[in-house]
Amino acid sequence: MGKEEKRIEILKAALKVISGVGFEGAKMEDIAKEAGVGKGTIYEYFDSKNALLLEMIRYCTKCFQEGLIKTLAEGEDMLGKIRNLSMYGAAFLNAHAVLMNSHIAHQAMPEDMKTQMKSDWSLVYKTIEDEVRKGMEIQEIRSDIDPEMAVAVIIGGVNQYTFKKLMEDNFTPQEIDHTGIAKTILTGLLY
Amino acid sequence: MGKEEKRIEILKAALKVISGVGFEGAKMEDIAKEAGVGKGTIYEYFDSKNALLLEMIRYCTKCFQEGLIKTLAEGEDMLGKIRNLSMYGAAFLNAHAVLMNSHIAHQAMPEDMKTQMKSDWSLVYKTIEDEVRKGMEIQEIRSDIDPEMAVAVIIGGVNQYTFKKLMEDNFTPQEIDHTGIAKTILTGLLY
Amino acid sequence: MGKEEKRIEILKAALKVISGVGFEGAKMEDIAKEAGVGKGTIYEYFDSKNALLLEMIRYCTKCFQEGLIKTLAEGEDMLGKIRNLSMYGAAFLNAHAVLMNSHIAHQAMPEDMKTQMKSDWSLVYKTIEDEVRKGMEIQEIRSDIDPEMAVAVIIGGVNQYTFKKLMEDNFTPQEIDHTGIAKTILTGLLY
Amino acid sequence: MGKEEKRIEILKAALKVISGVGFEGAKMEDIAKEAGVGKGTIYEYFDSKNALLLEMIRYCTKCFQEGLIKTLAEGEDMLGKIRNLSMYGAAFLNAHAVLMNSHIAHQAMPEDMKTQMKSDWSLVYKTIEDEVRKGMEIQEIRSDIDPEMAVAVIIGGVNQYTFKKLMEDNFTPQEIDHTGIAKTILTGLLY
DNA sequence: TATGAATGAGGATTCATTCAT
DNA sequence: GATGAATGAATCCTCATTCAT
């Protein structure tokens, strides 16, 4: 196994452990065990626990972002795109709830982590904002709306609904009505 | 100072400390110092750190819920209610970001905390859902919408926008365009 | 037991353990055990292992310095003073070899420790230099000698001889010919 | 490069690293890097870190001893010999302070190292003692003096003075008054 | 009742040593 | 022979919790 592969192995192990017990709850020993390496080995690849977590977040955000672009491209219109986003986000949230939350719950992180996360996540925002602008150009979306607000309603609405269904009602990602939430966001609440 | 007052003092101190350094970062000693009591005293009022945090969350959720009812009542129509919700949530998020997040980032919490939080937050949901239903009755809101989805879009959209503005663009709560986000949610994105 | 007494207890325990196994070999746990306290207790009194060692050195240097003044005062003339110095130094070296050496073997210490030690030991030098100057005034010691050199010959000669006898020939402090080495230093080697 | 040459390379690297950071502070990895070999290679030449250090001390003591004989031979009389000893020792101390100290600060060493060092250093003592005895024979040095004491005063006096000047007053070896300290040792302190 | 000194389990990190290549 | 990636025992330090006062 090459050096880079082992790095990824450790990152995946970290993600898995952290997804179960959270950042602080994750012990280096457990991550090592999960990765099938010795405790000391992790330190050959990462400077510290914090550095490992930071890289893990970056790695996952990158993965999310890459899949996001693909899933958005597969939607034919805005409804399809948001539905796909919902499905994709639900699957991701289901697998790595902690990670998704990390972008929100980073108050207690060291400053460098916060900065990193902001810049990584702003890419995700940007990607969706681009879709909104495209929708405006083809007159699918009203041009009097602030694109930033549109993005917030899309991401926030989808996430909130998905979160509720997964975590509180114990739905599986497949059982969620992705089309319904997408429509609600697009058509608004008023008559 | 009565027993109940001191309890509240400690809860407030816990909230303050945790808002700054997060759940795991909050040390009992610091909370005690903030509350102006001895370390041991906290254990006279709460069984453990976890118990303290749990109660703190309950206390704050209750506070939030009480203010929420008031703020919603002050809105004349749905637009006013959502705008008020946005303003109120922004102020709260600004003061106690960690707490707001706690309802999301509770993956790593002990099971009892999670359960508690779910039931506390479901009250908030319920309160807003009631408003949505009222809006349907008076035909302000379309009745073909799933009220649960409407709630998700309202809460999610407002929170997401507020969060972005406060945390990434460093707005103050007052600088946020609460009316704009409320309108966007209500009218949807389509022509 | 008062706070200050326990501090001293820990310092003494540290000295004892370190005397046996050296700075790096001394484990905090062993020092705690020797002091009859828990591991964590040490950290109530000292910030870190290094801080403990630093204070320990200071404490001992202070003790040495105090005894030194007394032992020098008890010598009637220069011969008596140097003999006393030799006896006193031998007893101290016998009990706390590591400490005496620490003033020499501090190359690897953190910078703040070195600085501290230099200033502490310069007091010892100063004390002996004062005696040399007094000896010059009463014309017991030749005034054409650099007092700094005289101090070096006294301290160096006495220590070297004591060290050799204690460590290599396994003498007890009492078996050493303190008068002989003092005479040799005072009268020099030439006819 | 022959086997023996590489051995010496490693020994020199060990000396260099240790001179900077002390015995415990020296990491095998750094020594390997300094020697320009792999970490594992050191273990082809030495059984363990302790064994390496032990050999390093032996090697250096041998070097010191060889230079010592030469430098003593170059002194015409006792004054010249001690002056030369002072100059030589100062240069050595300046370059390898840790090593010189090792002969003193070996309390914490494993037993076998101590034994080795004692026997190595006793050679140095012996060499100087021989000079003292020769000085007695030609009636340059008083014969009523214990040669062992004379040696102690010479070595101790010279070292103490050199150490003070180098380490505390930040002199270079050349700036030290080697003749002065030699005279002081030889003529003693009394009128 | 209130306190804070004492505790020690727990966890991050280091580094001498091994061994497959 | 030479290497350096992998290892885990060892150790410093933290902090929730206890309990004597």
Image (cartoon, coloured by chain):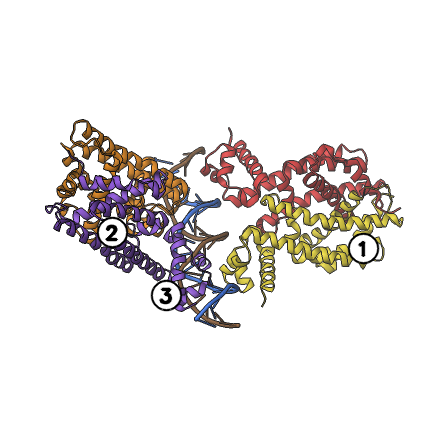
Chain colours: A yellow, B red, C orange, D purple, E brown, F blue
Residue type at mark 3 is Asp
Vertical arrangement, residue D123 with respect to residue C134, above or below:
below
Mark 3 burial class by Cα count in 10 Å: few <14, some 14-19, many 20+: few
Task: Give the chain letter at badge 1.
Answer: A
Q: Closest to the observer: C46 or C167?
A: C167
Q: Amino acid at mark 2?
A: Leu
The quadrant of the image that shows the C terminus of chain D is top left
x and y percentages locating residue C83 in the rendered image: 16, 39
Using the rendered image, report if marks 2 and 3 lie on a common chain.
yes
Work out how far the residue at label 2 is from the one at label 1, CA to CA, in angstroms.
91 Å
Dot 1, how many residues are within 10 Å of its Cα: few (below 14), some (14-19), or many (20+)?
many
Q: Secondary structure at mark 3?
A: loop
Q: Quadrant of the N terminus of chain D?
A: bottom left
Q: Residue tagged by mark 2?
A: D72
Choose top left, top right, bottom left or bottom right for residue B55: top right
Three-letter code, disc 1: Lys
- Residue at 38% in and 47% down: C108
Residue A91 coordinates in the image, percent (x, y): 70, 58
Residue C122 x %, y %: 31, 35
Chain of the residue under the numbered disc 3 shown in the image: D
Label annotation for residue A81: 1
Cα distance between the residues tagged 3 and 1: 66 Å
Number of marks drawn: 3
Circle 2 — which element? Answer: helix
D40 is higher (above) or lower (below) than A185: below
Does the image show residue B18?
yes
Q: Which residue is mark 3?
A: D47
Q: Position of residue D17 (x, y in %)?
A: 41, 54
Residue at the location (85% across, 40% down)?
B140
